Amino acid sequence: MAQEKEKLAVETLALTKVYKGKAAVDHLHMKVREGAIYGFIGRNGAGKSTTLKMLCGLAKPTEGEIRLFGKPAGDTYVSKRLGCLIESTGLYPNMTARQNMVMKAKCMGLADEKSVDRVLDSTGLANAGGKKVRHFSMGMKQRLGIALALLGNPDLLILDEPINGLDPEGTREVRQLLSALCQEGKTLIISSHILGELSKMATHYGIIKEGNLVEQIDRESLEQNCRDYFQIEVDDSKRALPLILEHLHGIGRQICDNAGLAHGAAEQVPDVQAEVMDDGRIRLYGLKEGAWLNQLLIENQIQVYSSGFHHMDLEEYFLKRMEEEHSMDNLEAGENGRRAFQGGKSYV
């Protein structure tokens, strides 16, 4: 039986936006599955908001194509399946929550005001419908912004920084609301700098850097890539690292058991990878036991400030990917410079 074709809520093909000769978004190929919560992450100025604006029809692409639910983004039917909250909620502070909702519903041609009450209820604002927006907390304003995006019962929600500036309680409320909307079958694209919160609800991720989509990954693959590691902070990583690597390859290595007794061991440690961070911390991936390591360094007069096992979270994974991309950029720049230099040589 042929495998069922993946249903996509959003697909972009070479999507590009150029401002003043510079590509803010550069030939972006994005795929968002129906029913997913797609976490869209990147540094400030990476092109997140510009991409979302193009998906919502608020900015015109310089080139490329956007397809929503398999149809061109300009399709009239498709546009009705889309709800957006980009950058700010655009609320009228002297109007009540319900008045803000009714005004937008009328602009959308929605005559049934009961739909307004249903959305206010689903977003937890039923009891605040008569309260003026200027008296709302930040969390309530964000929920009202999401409620406005939900008018017309869209299948796709695009939300730019929906939890930015919220206190812990407001963040939890919005997170629970977004998770509930996904359970109802809606597709969500969410950009956020608060990666710890995003990781609690996102099912898929897209990482963007300087307008280029670095990676798209689902939650399961991310969890596999976010390996546990043993991290150690010492006074001299340049001395410590060769010593550690030597012993990891079974050369005169000692292991300390849980009782603190040292005994010789000739076993190899497979698949252990070492990484030195910019601040001198050493990370060892695949290491199962770390007590022997502390003793080894202390015996060799290397001071250990801290050590222990850690699990890489979304934020660390994102920063690691950014460092890898930066290293690749530098490598390519060096190679291009070398070629240019060789090409410009003159021989007498």
Image (spheres, helix red, strand yellow):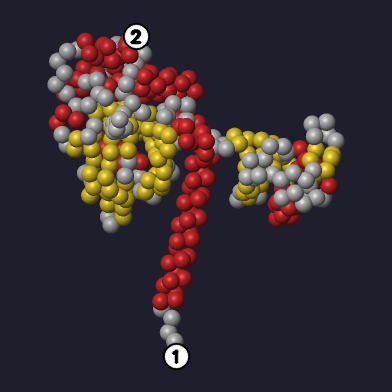
Per the model, the C-alpha gap separating discs 2 and 1 is 86 Å
Query: How far across and down, in percent of the image, does residue 304 sit?
Result: 76, 44
Instruction: Indicate which disc residue 127 carries.
Output: 2
Q: Secondary structure at mark 1?
A: loop
User: Does residue 140 appear in the picture of this structure?
Assistant: no
Q: Looking at the image, which residue is at 69% across and 44% down?
A: 269
Q: Name the spot of residue 26 as percent of width and height, x first.
A: 32, 50
Residue at coordinates 79% horizontally, 40% vertically from top-left?
A: 255
Q: Residue at x 27, y 22 (%)?
A: 150
The answer to whether any part of residue 118 appears in the image is yes
Say above or below: 219 vs 100. below
Left or right of 45 in this view: 317 = right
Residue matched to label 1: 348
Frontmost residue, 228 versus 278: 228
On-image quarter of the C terminus? bottom left
Three-letter residue code for mark 1: Val
Residue 158 located left or right of residue 173: left
Residue 9 placement (x, y as % from top left): 28, 32
Q: In this rendering, which labeled residue sits more in front, label 2 or label 1?
A: 1
Q: What's the amino acid at mark 2?
A: Asn
Q: Quadrant of residue 112?
A: top left
